[in-house]
């Protein structure tokens, strides 16, 4: 993350996002600080999808007519651009409906390995095997592993979290052992903002021959990420969190692994040969894309990574760094406000979660909403983490390239307003 | 300011000085309810006076509760105790039905103070669908606890 | 299907579909006869999705701010309208990424029943149990059941198909027995056009206590369908085949069944309570919608059913009836052309598949493409059916509300052109 | 007319009068390939003359095949037999590489008649990506059959 990058021209960027021009709650300027849940789409993405639908829409990989050709080209070109964006090869990119599906894909394919051929043996898990996750996972990177354990008899173990909101790696070598088959962890916490030490986890996983599965939902949209360089085995992210459409996500898998991985969702377009008695399956990525895919959404995601690339991920990261730092410092000055997560910018991205003494997060969120500031309140699909941090819920502000320091000010003002309203300040 | 519409004085009063809070003995049944979106929780006990548990003519002798949550869920549960203690189960369910109707009415339902008492203060909350669940959390626990008390003759 | 319905105003309808105004292959008018693979979108659907994205986009069911409220309302309103469109209740409609996912959802939930609570017992399958499908299924309604059998040890059986392309129900009572747990079949064949006798199959399945799973991909877009009235247990269809976006489909399930069905994809938004050790799940439909959903696509699908309702499904069915009848009669007059499937309009919808003596379907499709006619060639994801009909592949034309008799003429002319080009006529 | 670009006379000739069609003995290995989209199939046998199977200097003595498919896949396989019979495995693979390059070139690659012979007629097909797989089906079978013949010393 270099702070020497030229600053973003926020006025120009904002103009690309029509929704940011609207007002809420009787004329308040919309201050959108919920991009961690879902980001907004620039006109470029909306236009790309619409142009596709008005000129080339057809079922991909299925027709011999001109529209089908154009649609297939558009879809595969999007795959190639998304792959390049994260340092992967096109055949390592599987389009899913969201990141959640990608994680389930890996977990289900692993239980399907039990009834698949010998090439799938490396993915089999059963009693005595262990899956290691962390206490800071989004439910999407926790529940599928709980379910895999339930289906197969494997055991779930997890890294704890320190009071500061860092992964507690003290017992790395006791947790990740020869029994470990998978180490699944988030690249950047959607609550704490913590950026986890991928290298250390990957190294240990490799030592013991475990697969690494990285939840990159909150990193790929916000930092330059090179999955090949990180050396992870699988990774997932969602289009809607990176200026792209909803309904499309990505599972990245190293070629060699995807080649051997059994299918998950089955049906049309993922087969090699079908007889009533049994079927065989196509090579990746097709093997994992059953049915007519989210075609225009992939095209939209391609336009989103183009947009992000033009702006520059380094610059976006630097910009968010600045906003996060400003928010942390302003919030820490308010008596009664406690930030949940690292309060310094070391290995930290732009999710800022906090509590306000005497004001429940729901109520704080409501006051913020009434002044136009859209934040998220609750446990943000990370309930165990909230339990660990001993808070039932938090208020979370998340930043993106279209936010500016005025938005930070609005947030801070809104928090003070909530304190005034509930008589705690 | 819009906020005052939602956070009527009555609500803030109940929030700051909740009625009947704390879990008490004796009780016939307890229910624990959670709002899965925000993790808010309420544990609520009912003590009924009547031979047959959910006999609609049984009297609600006591409702006691504990929990954590936002002002809306806490205040609504406090109001609930005022509205149902001393009434019959049937009367309590009628109040519940009226309150649900109000909350799901998107601000279009005119509340009846004779039925809902302080509950009419939640009319403004009904305009915020995300908060409706908060207002109903305690009521869900109440309904559930009453229905669990069905078999109290056997379990006592 | 009443032929007394007022005819469609095709000129007006066509004007709603911008893509139909384009030309292909050096200026040829686009004659789109591939709606069975994917239909085109009217401006009304494109606009609805865009308006949503430009004004109300947010993560649904997750935020307390105004955008989140509006987005949730739009999403749930779409669910309610889609439900009404097929005679279902909103809580019986689960949004999936496509129909294929919906079928996999049921098949996987059934194997998950093995490790779920007692309420899921009715869904458990194992050795000795039988799943019955048909030889005319799309791969999407065949391979997931093969895989379920592979995972659980159950046995797959199937109805044959007659030479005319009808389901062979002669052995109904021998095939569907006390051992049968599921009868999965298509409402309307995507190759033959055959409309299957749902009532007879449902009746027999009920007698033996088997679940019915209906692939309604080719019926819901083209006929008035009331799922409640049909009495089926589960049904699926895809948005992209009914003027809606890609990336969204529907699983319908009778309330009572969805209530008891274990989850499939797990993660955020589908939980009731999450601890590191284990989780519990939300009631349907949320239980089956993990992660941020295809929000704007659901909104688009809502607009699509509105559009279809305004035109009227009775009228659409009558219109397609007319075009299909014309195509069947014109094609049957060409020597060397053989229709694969029923040649009368009894219990038959608008998929017309055929072979041309001496001209491979790929080559016929290429000639048609060169004159602007977009058809599909191959086995249309129904390979076993093609084997049964003793053809390696077919040319398939499918009609929709925006096609007219000129399109039929273009098809027939194109086929004659193919014969001339390959010297077979 | 555009169609003539794809369906050059040479292609139609090979389609109507295929060279070397029919499965023959003796052979070292056979490969069966399917196009999953359309169900087109080809079974192809190679007979190599050389001590070590895939020794690049082994000579392709015979290629025989059978199958069903469109004009493009049938004609391409027919042309294949002309191009590889009598050549060394290495030479055959070089032709294969040139043909793949042509087919994946989207019409931008200038074919070399000295290398590709009648294969240059497929330049127009390269503009239709959906048909490229058809043109390569026989070649996939050829490559696969040669690689399967690796162990022929042992299996004979
Ligand atoms: C009869 C039938 N079933 C299932 C499908 C699969 O639908 P989707 O690919 O949208 O999941 C299709 C369409 O491809 C179909 O025609
Ligand atoms: C860290 C993290 N993981 C996973 C997810 C799930 O993503 P999606 O809901 O798009 O599948 C999210 C977002 O909700 C997230 O923030």
Image: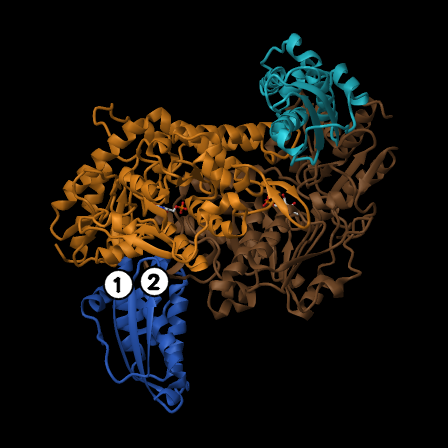
Chain colours: A orange, B blue, C brown, D cyan
Quarter the C terminus of chain A occupies: bottom left
Tell me the chain of label 1.
B
Q: Residue at x 47, y 50 (%)?
A: A108
Measuring from the top left, give residue B102's x and y in whole percent: 38, 66
Is B34 rendered above or below residue C313? below
- Could you tell me which secondary element the residue under label 2 belongs to? loop
Q: Residue at x 80, y 25 (%)?
A: C417
Question: Do dots 1 and 2 share one subunit?
Answer: yes
Look at the numbered discs 1 and 2 and tell me whether their residues touch, using CB distance below 8 Å: yes
Q: Nearer the viewer, residue A82 or A425?
A: A82
Q: How many marks?
A: 2
Q: Estimate how packed mark 1 is, as few (under 14), some (14 to 19) or many (20 or more) residues with alpha carbons within 10 Å.
A: many
Q: Is mark 1 within 8 Å of ligand 2?
A: no
Q: Nearer the viewer, residue C403 or A126?
A: A126
Residue at the far top in the pictured view = D114
Tell me the chain of label 2.
B
**Does residue C284 show up?**
yes
- Could you tell me which secondary element the residue under label 1 belongs to? loop
| A164 on left or right of C202 | left
| C76 on left or right of C404 | left
Q: Nearer the viewer, residue D66 or A132?
A: D66
Q: Estimate how packed mark 2 is, as few (under 14), some (14 to 19) or many (20 or more) residues with alpha carbons within 10 Å.
A: some
Q: Say which mark, if any, is on residue B35.
A: 2
Quarter the N terminus of chain A occupies: top left
Give the labeled residue for mark 1: B69
Is C9 rendered above or below residue A175? above
Q: Residue at x 37, y 45 (%)?
A: A210
**Does residue C242 show up?**
no
Measuring from the top left, give residue A252's x and y in whole percent: 43, 37
Q: Quadrant of residue C176?
A: bottom right
Measuring from the top left, give residue B106's x and y in whole percent: 40, 59
């Amino acid at each position: 993350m270099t702070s020497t990058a030229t600053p973003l021209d926020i006025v120009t960027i904002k103009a690309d996002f029509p929704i940011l021009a609207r007002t809420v709650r009787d004329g308040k300027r919309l201050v959108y600080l919920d991009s961690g849940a879902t980001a907004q789409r620039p006109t470029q993405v909306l236009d790309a999808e619409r142009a596709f639908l008005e000129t080339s829409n057809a079922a991909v990989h299925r027709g011999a007519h001109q529209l089908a050709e154009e649609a297939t080209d558009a879809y595969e070109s999007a795959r190639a651009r998304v792959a390049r964006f994260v340092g992967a090869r096109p055949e390592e990119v599987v389009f899913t409906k969201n990141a959640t599906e990608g994680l389930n894909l890996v977990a289900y394919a692993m239980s399907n390995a039990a009834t698949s051929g010998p090439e799938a043996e490396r993915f089999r898990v059963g009693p005595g095997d262990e899956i290691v996750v962390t206490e800071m996972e989004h439910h999407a990177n926790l529940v599928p592993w709980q379910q895999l354990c339930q289906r197969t008899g494997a055991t779930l173990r997890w890294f704890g979290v320190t009071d500061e909101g860092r992964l507690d790696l003290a017992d790395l070598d006791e947790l990740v052992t020869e029994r470990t088959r998978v180490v699944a962890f988030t690249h950047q916490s959607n609550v704490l903002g913590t950026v986890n030490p991928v290298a250390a986890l990957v190294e240990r996983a490799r030592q013991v021959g475990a697969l690494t599965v990285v939840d990159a939902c909150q990193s790929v949209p916000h930092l330059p990420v090179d999955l090949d360089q990180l050396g992870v085995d699988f990774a997932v992210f969602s289009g809607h969190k990176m200026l792209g459409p909803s309904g499309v996500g990505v599972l990245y898998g190293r070629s060699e692994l995807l080649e051997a991985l059994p299918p998950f969702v089955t049906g049309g377009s993922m087969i090699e040969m079908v007889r009533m008695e049994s079927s065989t399956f196509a090579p990746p990525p097709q093997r994992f894309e059953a049915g007519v895919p989210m075609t225009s959404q992939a095209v939209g995601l391609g336009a989103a990574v183009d947009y992000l690339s033009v702006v520059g991920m380094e610059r976006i990261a630097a910009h968010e760094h600045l906003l996060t730092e400003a928010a942390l410092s302003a919030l820490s000055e308010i008596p009664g406000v406690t930030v949940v997560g690292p309060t310094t910018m070391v290995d930290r991205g732009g999710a800022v979660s906090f509590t306000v003494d005497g004001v429940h997060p729901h109520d704080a969120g409501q006051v913020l909403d009434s002044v136009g500031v859209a934040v998220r309140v609750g446990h943000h699909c990370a309930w165990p983490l909230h339990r660990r941090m001993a808070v039932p819920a938090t208020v979370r502000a998340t930043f993106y390239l279209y936010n500016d320091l005025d938005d930070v000010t609005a947030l801070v003002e809104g928090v003070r307003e909530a304190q005034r309203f509930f008589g705690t300040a | 300011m819009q906020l005052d519409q939602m956070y009527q004085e009555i609500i803030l009063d109940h929030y700051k000085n909740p009625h009947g809070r704390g879990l008490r003995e004796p009780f016939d049944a307890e229910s624990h309810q959670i709002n899965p979106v925000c993790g808010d929780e309420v544990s609520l006990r009912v003590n009924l006076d009547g031979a047959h548990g959910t006999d609609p003519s049984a009297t609600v002798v006591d409702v006691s509760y504990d929990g954590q949550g936002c002002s809306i869920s806490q205040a609504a549960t406090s109001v609930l105790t005022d509205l149902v203690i001393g009434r019959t189960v049937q009367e309590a369910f009628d109040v519940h039905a009226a309150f649900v109707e109000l909350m799901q009415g998107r601000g279009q339902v005119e509340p009846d103070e004779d039925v809902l008492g302080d509950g009419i203060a939640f009319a403004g909350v009904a305009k915020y669908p995300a908060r409706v669940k908060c207002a109903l959390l305690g009521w869900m626990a109440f309904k559930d606890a009453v229905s669990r008390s069905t078999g109290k003759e056997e379990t006592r």
